[in-house]
Amino acid sequence: SQQGEEDPQALSIQEGENATMNCSYKTSINNLQWYRQNSGRGLVHLILIRSNEREKHSGRLRVTLDTSKKSSSLLITASRAADTASYFCATDASGSARQLTFGSGTQLTVLP
Amino acid sequence: SQTIHQWPATLVQPVGSPLSLECTVEGTSNPNLYWYRQAAGRGLQLLFYSVGIGQISSEVPQNLSASRPQDRQFILSSKKLLLSDSGFYLCAWSVGSWGPLHFGNGTRLTVT
């Protein structure tokens, strides 16, 4: 079964607004990663947060991790039309990339 | 810098025909290599991974096989395609086993 599940499945916002996507998982993890996928393209790694970290920033991205609730959130601030994409969380329980489990993704649409 | 090439971008093949998808990585040595499949609107399913030349691990029983004839070359094959083999196939690499993953742009395979 899927380890990470994103919520919502789809999100539509206006340019300039913030977008928040959530990821829930079931078992203990070593780290959690967020990826972005433009339509018909490969995934691009955005950020990795380790189980002993609670928050991480990268440009307009902010990721939080709550291991007690087994959840993570990805916040994109001041969104742009170019942020339109699918966003996936991926969890691993063993520290091995071959054990990564991807969720089904959140489709973000940013309207100009 | 490292780059990953995956081809072809799209492929339409009849049921029962063979398949060969190729992936090459440049700018890094001894990468871990991965083949994923993505169904429409879904997350990624790991099919094969390789930690070295000739070393292939299969994650899911498939009508597919993988080979790594050279350090930075990873090939996905099938002797006889099934309709259920249709999907979006993604090649990826990582440094060691702990990621993050770097993806190619994928091959859209349609089996008719």
Image (cartoon, rainbow, N blue to C red):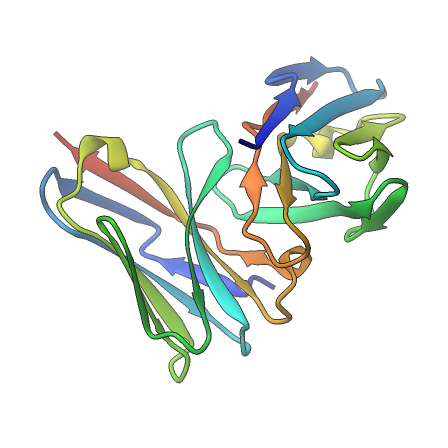
A97, A24: nearer the viewer: A97
Q: Quadrant of the C terminus of chain A?
A: top left
Task: Name the residue rendered at 10%, 47% in the picture.
Answer: A17
Task: Name the residue rendered at 84%, 18% in the picture.
Answer: B17
Left/right of residue B46 with respect to residue B106 in the rendered view: right
x and y, in percent, of residue B80 in the image? 87, 25
B101, A87: nearer the viewer: B101
Q: Quadrant of residue B85?
A: top right
- A101 relative to A54, above or below: above
Task: Name the residue rendered at 66%, 61% in the picture.
Answer: A99
x and y, in percent, of residue B97 in the image? 68, 57
- B83 relative to A13, above or below: above
Left/right of residue B64 with respect to residue A4 in the rendered view: right
Spot the residue most to the bottom.
A68
B39, B27: nearer the viewer: B27
x and y, in percent, of residue A111 in the image? 15, 33
Numbered disc total: 0
Task: Name the residue rendered at 82%, 50% in the picture.
Answer: B58
x and y, in percent, of residue A56 in the image? 31, 64
B101, A24: nearer the viewer: B101
Left/right of residue A42 with respect to residue B64 in the rendered view: left
Q: Quadrant of the N terminus of chain A?
A: bottom right
